[in-house]
Image: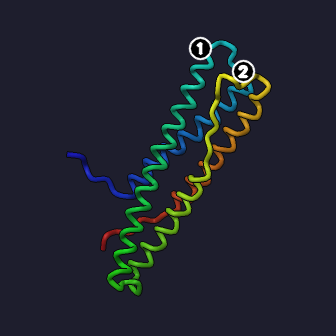
């Protein structure tokens, strides 16, 4: 049986995954700029690092989206029960707005692929795209981090 995790804990774990993804993207970008990997083995290592970053991003984003859906359901249920006038509704609604802003920011992230056709002269553009994706992840993290998850009562 899995142990219950609070929404705040789950959001913190998702933010950790997203932050790790952004850091990995910046590391790959810096490596590409500083010392282009000539050997197939070194290129494979960087591709693996990029793949791991994308996996971390996908997992973190998925969890933030799941939290958004939970808070949205809670908010909708309160609206359906005519509870919009309660302070709890205001807390839930504010939390939803913050999480939604995080999801919207994460939706704009486009992690570029490094294909075998990327030539050395294309590396600077790829590194810039990786840095840009990392910055977009940081924006989504900042929005999601601002969410204050209300207690049940």
Which image quadrant is residue 36 in?
top right
Q: Position of residue 153 (x, y in %)?
A: 30, 74
Looking at the image, the residue that sits furthest to the front is: 117
* Mark 2 vs mark 1, CA separation in Å: 12 Å
**Residue located at (56% from left, 63% from top):** 101
Q: Along the line of sight, which residue is nearer the eye, 142 or 136?
A: 136
Task: Identify the residue position indicated by label 2 in the image.
Answer: 36
Judge whether 123 appears above or below 38 on screen.
below
Judge whether 111 appears above or below 90 on screen.
above
Looking at the image, the residue that sits furthest to the left is: 1
Q: Along the line of sight, which residue is nearer the eye, 10 or 102?
A: 102
Q: Secondary structure at mark 1?
A: helix
Q: Secondary structure at mark 2?
A: loop
Task: Identify the residue position indicated by label 1 in the image.
Answer: 41
Relative to 78, is 144 on the left or the right? Answer: right
Mark 1 residue crowding within 10 angstroms, few (<14) / some (14–19) / many (20+): few
């Amino acid at each position: 049986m899995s142990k219950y995790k609070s929404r705040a804990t789950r959001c913190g774990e998702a933010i950790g995954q997203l932050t790790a993804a952004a850091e990995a993207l910046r590391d790959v970008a810096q490596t590409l700029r500083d010392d282009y990997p000539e050997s197939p083995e070194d290129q494979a290592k960087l591709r693996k690092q990029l793949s791991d970053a994308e996996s971390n991003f996908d997992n973190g984003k998925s969890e933030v989206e799941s939290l958004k859906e939970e808070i949205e359901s809670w908010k909708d249920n309160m609206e359906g029960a005519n509870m919009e006038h309660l302070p709890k509704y205001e807390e839930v609604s504010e939390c939803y707005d913050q999480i939604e802003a995080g999801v919207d920011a994460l939706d704009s992230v486009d992690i570029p692929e490094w294909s075998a056709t990327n030539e050395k002269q294309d590396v600077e553009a790829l590194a810039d795209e990786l840095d840009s994706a990392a910055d977009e992840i940081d924006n989504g993290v900042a929005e999601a981090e601002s969410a204050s998850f209300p207690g049940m009562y």
